[in-house]
C-alpha cells in the first residue's frame, strides 16, 4: 500500500473507548523489543503548553550537540510532523514500514492467543514513533502525552524526567470534572519516583506530585525573581531572572514558564546559557501566536480551550485596542462555548465562524449557530460562513476598508482551523 492508503487505514482507527489500564500497550511495547529503552526519556503532560515546552527542550538539546527525537500531537499540515528526529520529519517510507511491523506483530499475537489487542489511532502513531526513534539511536526522546497521562500510550515508556506544564479544565468528560481528578491523570506520567518539573502554582497539582515523587521542582517557587517583558515590535518575549536574560522567539508571558521548564532540564545536563540562547534562536513552533503575515497582519493560534483562549487574548490586548482585530474561528462540540465566546467578544465586534466538518467532534457553522442559540449566546457580532475561504476574503475586505479600524486577522479555535487556513493559503500560492 502507498502512504495515502496507509494513513487512511491509520486514521480509520479513531475510536473513543476509554482504557481502564495500559497493560495491552505495555505488552505490545515488549513484543516490539522495548524501543528507546536505552535513551533518556523526557515525558511531558499538561493541559496547554506541551508542544512549546517540547520544542524549547528540543532546540536547546540539539544546540548542545545531542541527538534528539520528538513526538508531539496533533499535526497541522502533515501527519509526519508528529514524529521528528533532529528536526527532520519521518519519511513516508518509514511510516509504511513501521506500521507494517506493528500491524504484523499485533496480528500474529492475536492469532496465537486467546485475547485480542486493539489499538487506536494515537496508540498506533506512538508505536510508529518509538520504532522509528529506536533506529535513530537518540540521546534524548521527548514524548508529549496525547490526552491526560496515566492511561496515555506514551506512558508505556519509563521516563527519566516528567514535565507538567499546567493543569486546567479540558476534556472533562474523560479526565474528570475537578482539578484534583485532572491533576491525578496528568501526574500519572510520574513513575518510579523520577524527577518531576512543573510550572503551576495549583494546590491540587502539588498534592498529586508529592504523592508520586519526593524529587520535584516547581519553577514558580524557584524563580520568584522572574521578570517578563514583551517585545511588541519583534513579537518576542524577554525573560530575566538571576541576573540572566533570555530572548524567546515565541510571544506571550506564559511562554516564559514553558521556557523555564526547558531551562531547568538544560541545567541538569550542564548546558551553558550561551548554548541555551542559541537553541532558543532556532525555535519555530507553528500555530502558537504565529505571525503568519505582516502585510496584512495575520496571526495564527491553536488556542482551543478556556485557558488557552484567555492567554491568546492577553497577547492580543498587548498589541491591539478593542475592536481592532477580526477573528476567524470554529470550535469542537466538546468545548465550553459560553466562556470562549464571551472572551472573544471582549476584544472584537467581528467574529467569523466556519465549519469543521471533517474533524473529530467537528461541527458545521450552522450546527454551531444552533448550539449558540440553545445556550443563549448572543450572535449579533458573529458571521457564520461554511467556507473558511469566504470568511477570509470577507475579513480581508474589512481589514482593507479605510472606514474601519481593523488592524489584524486572528485565526484560532483549534488545530483543525489552523490546518484549514494554511491549506487554503498554500493552494492560493500554487
Image (cartoon, grey):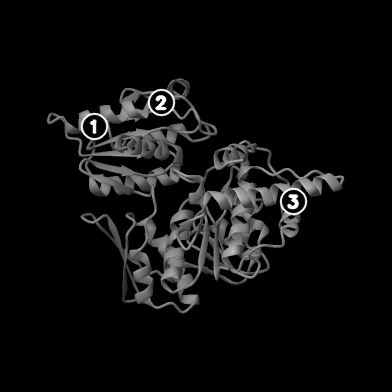
253 left or right, relative to 167: left
Q: Nearer the viewer, mark 2 or mark 1?
A: 1
Q: Nearer the viewer, mark 2 or mark 3?
A: 3
Label 2 secondary element: loop
Residue 156 drawn at (x, y percent): 68, 58
Is 288 located above or below residue 156 in the figure?
A: above
User: Residues under labels 2 and 1: Cα distance?
Assistant: 26 Å
Give residue 410's quadrant in the image: top left
Give residue 233's quadrant in the image: bottom left
Tell me the quarter of the image containing the C terminus.
top left
Crowding near the residue tagged with mark 1, few <14, some 14–19, many ≥20 C-alpha atoms within 10 Å: some
Residue 161 drawn at (x, y percent): 57, 67
94 left or right, relative to 332: right
- The tag earlier along the polypeptide, 2 or 1, is 2
Q: Which residue is mark 1?
A: 396
Residue at 45%, 74% in the rendered image: 65
Give residue 352's quadrant in the image: top left
Tell me the quarter of the image containing the N terminus.
top right
Q: Nearer the viewer, mark 3 or mark 1?
A: 3
Residue at 63%, 62% in the rendered image: 190
Mark 3 touches mark 1? (CB < 8 Å): no
**Depth order, front residue of 25/273:** 25
- The tag earlier along the polypeptide, 3 or 1, is 3
Q: Which residue is mark 3?
A: 105
Residue at 20%, 39% in the rendered image: 407
Q: Which residue is mark 2?
A: 377
User: Residues under labels 2 and 3: Cα distance?
Assistant: 51 Å
Label 3 secondary element: helix
Decide if residue 161 is in sight here.
Answer: no
User: Residues under labels 3 and 1: Cα distance?
Assistant: 52 Å
Mark 2 touches mark 3? (CB < 8 Å): no
Label 1 secondary element: helix
Amino acid at each position: 500500500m502507498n502512504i495515502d492508503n496507509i494513513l487512511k487505514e491509520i486514521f480509520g482507527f479513531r475510536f473513543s473507548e476509554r482504557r481502564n489500564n495500559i497493560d495491552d500497550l505495555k505488552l505490545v511495547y515488549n513484543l516490539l523489543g522495548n524501543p528507546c529503552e536505552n535513551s533518556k526519556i523526557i515525558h511531558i503532560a499538561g493541559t496547554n503548553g506541551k508542544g512549546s515546552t517540547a520544542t524549547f527542550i528540543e532546540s536547546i538539546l540539539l544546540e548542545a550537540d545531542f541527538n534528539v527525537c520528538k513526538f508531539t500531537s496533533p499535526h497541522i499540515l502533515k501527519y509526519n510532523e508528529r514524529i521528528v528526529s533532529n528536526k527532520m520529519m519521518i519519511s513516508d517510507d518509514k511510516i509504511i514500514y513501521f506500521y507494517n511491523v506493528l500491524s504484523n506483530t499485533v496480528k500474529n499475537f492475536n492469532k496465537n492467543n486467546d485475547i485480542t489487542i486493539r489499538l487506536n489511532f494515537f496508540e498506533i502513531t506512538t508505536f510508529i514513533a518509538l520504532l522509528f526513534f529506536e533506529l535513530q539511536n537518540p540521546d534524548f526522546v521527548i514524548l508529549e502525552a496525547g490526552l491526560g497521562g496515566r492511561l496515555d500510550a506514551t506512558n508505556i515508556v519509563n521516563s527519566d524526567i516528567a514535565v507538567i506544564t499546567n493543569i486546567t479544565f479540558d476534556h472533562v468528560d474523560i479526565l474528570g470534572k475537578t482539578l484534583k481528578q485532572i491533576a491525578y491523570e496528568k501526574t500519572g506520567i510520574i513513575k518510579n519516583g523520577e524527577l518531576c518539573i512543573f510550572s503551576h502554582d495549583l494546590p491540587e497539582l502539588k498534592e498529586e506530585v508529592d504523592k508520586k515523587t519526593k524529587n520535584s521542582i516547581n519553577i514558580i517557587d524557584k524563580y520568584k525573581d522572574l521578570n517578563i517583558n514583551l517585545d511588541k515590535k519583534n513579537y518576542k518575549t524577554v525573560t530575566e531572572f538571576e541576573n540572566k536574560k533570555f530572548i524567546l522567539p515565541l510571544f506571550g508571558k506564559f511562554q516564559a514558564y514553558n521556557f523555564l521548564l526547558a531551562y531547568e532540564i538544560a541545567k541538569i545536563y550542564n548546558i551553558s546559557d550561551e548554548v541555551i540562547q542559541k537553541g532558543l534562536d532556532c525555535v519555530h513552533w507553528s500555530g502558537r501566536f504565529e505571525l503568519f503575515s505582516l502585510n496584512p497582519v495575520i496571526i495564527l493560534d491553536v488556542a482551543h480551550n478556556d485557558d488557552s483562549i484567555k492567554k491568546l487574548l492577553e497577547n492580543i490586548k498587548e498589541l491591539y485596542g478593542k475592536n481592532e482585530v477580526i477573528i476567524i474561528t470554529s470550535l469542537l462540540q466538546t468545548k465550553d462555548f459560553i466562556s470562549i465566546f464571551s472572551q472573544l467578544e471582549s476584544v472584537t465586534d467581528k467574529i467569523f465562524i466556519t465549519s469543521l466538518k471533517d474533524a473529530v467532534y467537528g461541527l458545521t457553522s450552522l450546527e454551531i449557530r444552533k448550539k449558540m442559540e440553545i445556550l443563549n449566546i448572543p450572535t449579533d457580532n458573529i458571521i457564520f460562513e461554511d467556507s473558511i475561504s469566504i470568511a477570509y476574503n470577507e475579513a480581508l475586505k474589512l481589514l482593507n476598508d479605510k472606514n474601519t479600524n481593523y488592524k489584524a486577522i486572528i485565526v484560532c479555535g483549534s488545530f483543525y482551523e489552523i490546518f484549514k487556513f494554511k491549506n487554503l493559503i498554500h493552494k492560493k500560492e500554487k
